[in-house]
């Protein structure tokens, strides 16, 4: 039987592993070799991204862009990956500093490269690192791509022969900021004085949003904007429990400035969440609703809305209100990416995780662009950000949400059992409908519960949205007790 440490399996967005256990230099070299072989493989040309997606995604070169985040050994892993590719005759350019994943996605498109590789474990704990692969269209790789790469893995890791100094270094920050600059509205951004508190969570997006805000003399206050591979003991995921520092800073400024918004990006800068002027957490669902409402009502943009299976029902109601097409996809931005590429008219695509992609940009998520859009919302709002959210609720009803993660090895067994025999009642509520697009969703008269096994960690995720906070806690408590017995 193969050693578990030799396994390389892609999850919903890339391969992740524990540093020095399965995420090793040897495994990184094996994956780099498989990637090189994929890029010259005849199988690549037969993929549906060429035959079925409605466009030819042919790069100008067979080059690869490689970036890395602020995790332990990320620069070294990225360089090692680059050297293996160069040994295979693949032109390589390596970022000259830590970069957010959107910078890789954009540069693949901007310079028409064959692929982008990002060394990151995104929002995972500090003991993890990982690899994200972005094909020539700059978005998440579909399973048909990652399946081929996995099939090309060699058992023995190659030893790089290219020297570190042979690898070309490039600046990826400036091109991404130039692109984002075309998507923001300076007049709206500066419509009223606003303070943007930027929490980079020690991740690789630090400095990006601030650079643009500084250009327009918009006040900003960065926090956790240094390199800390341990992330001060928290996961770099913009959840309420991880944003104590952001809340404290906002509270200290509230008395002198009520037009405040806090923005938080994850470890590699592609996810977003926010806080209002009082330090109340604006979860990813409400963040999505704020941005959708702003793009439609203030910017006048139109197009389809793509929502993941775990995203708020506010998306459904708002699409009905605005007359926009709604497309629901499984969890994993690769599914949203395909819709963006094939439809061509997607206004916004979003996931519960805080992944939001916006029209006119990359077919991927970008927490930096979303940070700037939230700053525009704060600057142009008739009242405070908390009042803007209340206005949304006044139109479509209150929506409260929380996700609970349970560390359970038998997570897939639990979900499979429920899929086979779903309950007719749960937490004292009749189950009105069962949905099985990704995991198991139980619909009630006043909301829903979704149980889903994580594809990257030994975690059972419980997602719940109800019409009151008390109902959310009641349903989640029952779900957790059920899963743990």
Image (spheres, rainbow, N blue to C red):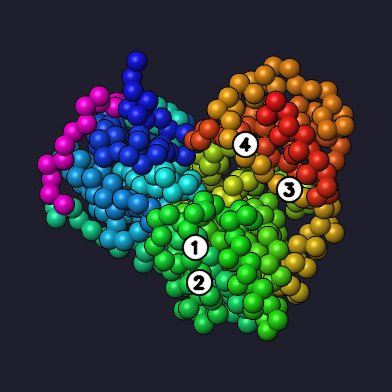
**Do tag 1 and tag 2 residues touch (Cβ < 8 Å)?**
yes
Residue 18 image position (x, y, % from top left): 40, 39
Chain part drawn in magenta: 151-164
> Which residue is under mark 1?
200
In-image side of 85 versus 390 (left or right): left
User: Does the stretch in magenta take in 373?
Assistant: no
> Which residue is under mark 2?
222
Toward the viewer: 464 or 49? 464
Residue 435 image position (x, y, % from top left): 72, 28
Q: Secondary structure at mark 3?
A: strand
Q: Which mark is residue 406?
A: 4
**Do tag 1 and tag 4 residues touch (Cβ < 8 Å)?**
no
Of marks 4 and 2, the one in the foreground: 4
Q: Is residue 267 visible?
A: yes
**Residue at horizontal 61 percent and vertical 33 percent from the top:** 460
Toward the viewer: 181 or 277? 277
């Amino acid at each position: 039987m193969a050693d578990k440490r030799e396994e390389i399996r892609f999850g919903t967005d890339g391969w992740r592993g524990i540093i020095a256990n399965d995420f090793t230099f040897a495994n990184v070299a094996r994956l780099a070799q498989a990637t090189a072989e994929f890029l010259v493989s005849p199988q690549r040309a037969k993929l549906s991204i060429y035959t079925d997606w409605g466009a030819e995604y042919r790069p100008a070169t067979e080059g690869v862009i490689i970036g890395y985040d602020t995790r332990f050994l990320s620069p070294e892993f990225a360089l090692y990956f680059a050297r293996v590719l160069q040994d295979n005759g693949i032109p390589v350019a390596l970022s000259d500093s830590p970069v957010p994943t959107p910078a890789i996605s954009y540069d693949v498109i901007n310079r028409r490269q064959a692929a982008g590789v990002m060394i990151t474990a995104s929002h995972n704990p500090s003991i993890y690192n990982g690899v994200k692969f972005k094909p020539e269209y700059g978005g998440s790789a579909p399973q048909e791509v990652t399946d081929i790469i996995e099939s090309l893995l060699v058992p023995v890791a190659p030893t790089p022969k290219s020297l570190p100094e042979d690898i070309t270094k490039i600046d990826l920050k400036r091109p991404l900021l130039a692109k984002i600059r075309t998507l923001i509205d300076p007049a709206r951004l500066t419509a009223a004085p606003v303070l943007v508190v930027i929490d980079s969570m020690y991740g690789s997006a630090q400095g990006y949003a601030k650079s643009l805000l500084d250009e327009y003399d918009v006040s900003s206050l960065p926090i956790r904007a240094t390199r800390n591979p341990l992330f001060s003991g928290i996961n770099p995921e913009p959840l309420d429990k991880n944003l104590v520092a952001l809340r404290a800073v906002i509270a200290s400024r509230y008395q002198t400035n009520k037009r405040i918004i806090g923005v938080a990006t994850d470890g590699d800068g592609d996810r977003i969440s926010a806080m209002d002027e009082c330090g109340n957490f604006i979860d990813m669902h409400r963040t999505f609703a704020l941005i959708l409402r702003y793009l439609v009502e203030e910017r006048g943009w139109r197009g389809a809305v793509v929502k993941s299976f775990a995203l708020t029902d506010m998306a459904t109601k708002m699409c009905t209100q605005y007359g926009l097409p709604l497309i629901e996809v499984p969890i994993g931005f690769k599914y949203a990416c395909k819709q963006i590429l094939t439809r061509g008219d997607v206004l916004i695509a979003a996931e519960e995780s805080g992944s939001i992609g916006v029209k006119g940009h990359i077919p991927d998520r970008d927490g930096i662009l979303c940070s700037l859009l939230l700053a525009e919302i704060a600057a142009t709002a008739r009242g405070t950000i908390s009042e803007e959210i209340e206005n949304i609720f006044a139109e479509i009803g209150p929506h409260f949400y929380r996700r609970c993660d349970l560390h359970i090895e038998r997570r897939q067994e639990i979900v499979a059992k429920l899929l086979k025999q779903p309950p007719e009642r749960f937490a004292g509520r009749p189950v009105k409908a069962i949905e099985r697009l990704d995991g198991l969703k139980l619909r009630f008269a006043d909301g829903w519960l979704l149980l889903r096994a994580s594809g990257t960690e030994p975690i059972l995720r419980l997602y719940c949205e109800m019409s009151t906070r008390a109902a959310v806690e009641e349903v989640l408590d029952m779900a957790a007790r059920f899963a743990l017995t």
